Amino acid sequence: DGGITQSPKYLFRKEGQNVTLSCEQNLNHDAMYWYRQDPGQGLRLIYYSQIVNDFQKGDIAEGYSVSREKKESFPLTVTSAQKNPTAFYLCASSITGGRGEAFFGQGTRLTVV
Amino acid sequence: AQSVTQPDIHITVSEGASLELRCNYSYGATPYLFWYVQSPGQGLQLLLKYFSGDTLVQGIKGFEAEFKRSQSSFNLRKPSVHWSDAAEYFCAVAHGSGNTGKLIFGQGTTLQVKP
């Protein structure tokens, strides 16, 4: 079945560490997105990519980095520069040139310990 | 700047009662509008979408939504709520020049269903 797989489901980070969240899709979508979800704030866009080897900052990119070396994969690194990384992270994909209909993964909950 | 507002943070309805979740958007052009549902600790599932044409759109699980341009609204409705509908609901609009597919989300409405 086609879909988006995020791993791990739960992730714990110590202060000062970088961690990488995985996102893989087999929907053959060109565009991929990372959103951050905090209680009462909806979802906010971190980074997005419309094509391999290209990506753009979203509304809250500070403290995060991404890469897009393969069409299927769009990993997100939460760096030590992100001061408040505890959140639920959602990866999504869509057709480039489509109308924004995005398909979401099951999310990764990151907690700083 | 584009924005989406869901005025109701939390709504409680009795099972079998009707439901309406409100969504207002701010967008210069004709928007692409969506409603997503999220169960606790899960990803988002698309309920329905509006691109153009008929302003009343049908979605999955018996949900429908009506686009009203004059009111900048896209309210979600269901005639009879089931206990399994308890979840968080997000309204979203697609924006961006060149149609990047980026979504702007409202803050979400948590639906509780009483037996």
Image (spheres, coloured by chain):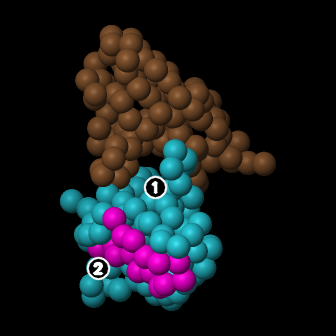
Chain colours: A brown, B cyan
Cα gap from disc 2 to disc 1, whole angstroms: 20 Å
The 10 Å Cα crowd at callout 2, few under 14, some 14 to 19, many 20 or more, is some
| Residue A31 vs residue A14, the one in the foreground | A14
Q: Is residue A77 left or right of residue A71?
A: left
* Quarter in which the N terminus of chain B is drawn: bottom left
| Residue A76 vs residue A94, the one in the foreground | A76
User: Is the magenta region chiefly helix, strand or loop?
Assistant: strand
| Dot placed on the residue nearer the N-terminal end, 2 or 1 | 2
Q: Indicate the secondary structure of the residue bearing disc 2.
A: loop
Is B41 contained in the magenta span? no
Q: Tell me, for residue B35, which label it has, or none.
A: none
Is B11 contained in the magenta span? yes
| Residue B79 vs residue A81, the one in the foreground | B79
Q: Is residue B47 above or below residue A86?
A: below
The 10 Å Cα crowd at callout 1, few under 14, some 14 to 19, many 20 or more, is many
Q: Position of residue B15 (x, y in %)?
A: 53, 78
Instruction: Point out the frontmost of discs 2 and 1.
Output: 2
Q: Tell me, for residue B101, which label it has, or none.
A: 1
Seen as rendered, the residue at the extreme front is: B115
Q: Residue at x 73, y 48 (%)?
A: A2
Residue indicated by mark 2 = B72
Of all chains, the one bearing label 1 is B
